Amino acid sequence: MALGKQAKTLNSSQQKAVLNYLQSTRSPVRNKVIFLLSLKAGLRAKEISQLTWRMITTSSGEISDCISLTNSASKGSSGGVIWLNSDLSIALHELWSLSWQLEENDYVITSERRGNMSAQAIVNIFSNWYKQMGFEGCSSHSGRRTFITNAARKISTVGGSMRDVQMLARHSSLLMTQRYIESDVDAMKRVVQLI
């Protein structure tokens, strides 16, 4: 994917604006979960559409501290464990409490008719939100790129490395992970002054 064709990342004010906008939609809790699955867990549209409650609940039926994403729900064989951000965990608890007669095999994200949504439907939802907000160049992949970029910028503060970011992104190569990371001109200016 050429650099000019990549989805744009979302800055913190854009993230807040989207969360505020979603409160006024027909399914605010579900839509918040969709957005946070992308932004705070780095899930792709297909993964959001294929996520089941079994992948995020414990054997006792409680929301887990991680997503156990199966290969069948991911791109290729890129399933794995994704740790839950606290904001995403809260939103999932809220969605779980609003859902009635759920089975653990049920999809987390459903349409108003309770059927699961296709990956294309998730792509379309993101496209519509960003169009409504005037965010040009943003797509369903913007949250994922933002997640990977933010993880790369913060991983050294918790003793991690780029290999850990690669594992969070569930990429087979570090080179692919590096292609997702947005550069930061201000950070480059500051680091040069430290040299």
Image (cartoon, rainbow, N blue to C red):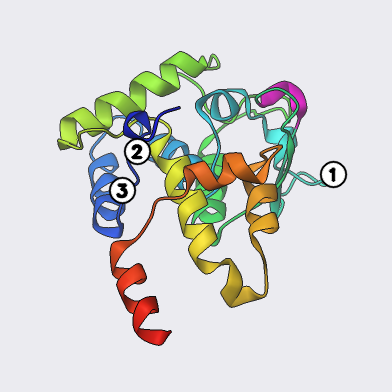
Image x and y of residue 163, in percent: 70, 56
Q: Who's the residue at 23% across and 50% down the image? A: 17
Quarter of the image for the C terminus: give it.
Answer: bottom left
Q: Which mark is residue 19?
A: 3
- For mark 2, give the secondary structure: helix
Task: From the viewer's side, name the closer residue of 160 and 91.
Answer: 160
Image x and y of residue 11, in percent: 30, 55
Is any part of residue 112 visible from this angle? no
Is residue 93 in the magenta section? no
Q: Earlier in the sequence, mark 2 or mark 1?
A: 2
Q: Would you name the residue on which mark 1 appears?
A: 59
Q: Who's the residue at 27% across and 45% down the image? A: 18
Q: Earlier in the sequence, mark 2 or mark 3?
A: 3
Q: Residue furthest front?
A: 195
- Cα distance, mark 2 to mark 1? 28 Å
Q: Which mark is residue 28?
A: 2
Q: Is residue 147 above or below residue 50?
A: below
> Where are the magenta residues, as a range?
70-74
Q: Amino acid at mark 2?
A: Pro
